[in-house]
Amino acid sequence: MAKTVFITGATSGFGKAMTHRFSREGYRVIITGRRQSRLADLEKELNAQDCAGVKTLCFDVLERKACFEAVASLPKDWQMIDLLINNAGLAAGRDLFEEALLEDWETMIDTNIKGLLYITRAVIPLMVRQNRGHIINIGSIAGKEVYERGNVYCATKAAVDALSQAMRADLLRHQIKVTAIHPGAAETEFSLVRFKGDPEKAAKVYEGYTPLSAEDIADITFYTAS
Ligand code: NDP
Ligand code: 8X3
């Protein structure tokens, strides 16, 4: 039986590259995001490539009820989740501490911390039932090294690091492995989202050096899982 991976934030960047990689490696993929049309396109593409199986779940990780309902909606034969990749996340704004918008701070905390917690809590019972599983949380170098104007984004990724250690300590008794991956800067839609759709500001982030690619992160994630 093919293994099953549940990937949050599969409509773009790391999550999309991971979806392609794990699917190519024979996994069944459960893919999530808010953009239904992108999920549908991805599903079509994977089916055309003869993948082991694909299931799409369209919801917002900010909504606690939607997270639990989405996981609960999985048919029985999709509930054997071998691997959960908590990837959905974002930065909103890059402003000085005293000037940043409180709404941006709330969006990052709600998405990167609370969203990750909701999904994890919804999936854990399925893994406990199997007495095995693996959770990979996507943190960031930003959670290890705080930079100017990174404030709350960095703090949310430091929280992902702490929560990964907390999960590891508590879930060991259920044979559930927990890994955190902390990528450096990679060129995806991340900066476009951070700068609220401003392509010039987004492009500037990657000037003067070669950033990582989404495929690099998919590669290290697959290596970690395998
Ligand atoms: P992208 O913006 O390309 O992708 C982000 C993904 O997260 C999208 O699929 C998006 O889907 C999903 N997402 C965001 N908010 C929500 C939400 N509220 N509900 C559901 N899904 C959501 O960025 P990356 O691929 O670069 O980022 C992926 C992860 O990697 C993030 O956690 C980011 O913090 C982290 N990271 C990124 C780095 C980088 O330099 N790019 C470096 C280190 C870590 P949709 O919009 O369809 O909902
Ligand atoms: C994204 C990487 O360095 O732009 O997590 O914060 S960085």
Image: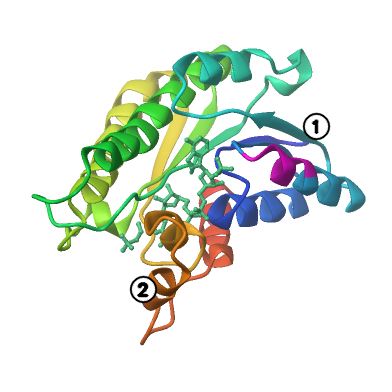
Q: Earlier in the sequence, mark 2 or mark 1?
A: 1
Which range of residues does the magenta coloring cover?
A: 35-40
Asked if 119 appears above or below 186 in the picture, the reply is above
Residue 36 in picture, x, y percent from top left: 70, 37
Residue labelled with disc 2? 205
> Image check: 162 left or right of 48?
left
Marks 2, 1: nearer the viewer:
2
Disc sitting over residue 109 in the figure: none
Q: Residue at x 58, y 16 (%)?
A: 126
Q: Which residue extends farthest left?
A: 98
Residue type at tag 2? Val
Is residue 16 at all visible to an observer of this figure? Answer: yes
> Image check: 137 left or right of 38?
left
Coloured how? rainbow
Q: Residue at x 61, y 31 (%)?
A: 82
Question: Where ligand 2 lies, by image quadrant?
Answer: bottom left
Residue 65 in picture, x, y percent from top left: 50, 13
Mark 1: secondary structure: loop
Q: Badge 2 local density, few (<14 within 10 Å), some, or many (20+)?
A: some
Q: Badge 1 local density, few (<14 within 10 Å), some, or many (20+)?
A: few
Q: Nearer the viewer, residue 156 or 164?
A: 156
Q: Quadrant of the N terminus?
A: top right
Residue labelled with disc 1? 1
Q: How many marks?
A: 2
Q: Nearer the viewer, residue 183 or 115?
A: 115
> Image check: 210 left or right of 157?
right
Image marks 2 and 1: residues in contact by CB distance under 8 Å: no
Check residue 37 for magenta coloring: yes
Q: Main secondary structure of the magenta part?
A: helix
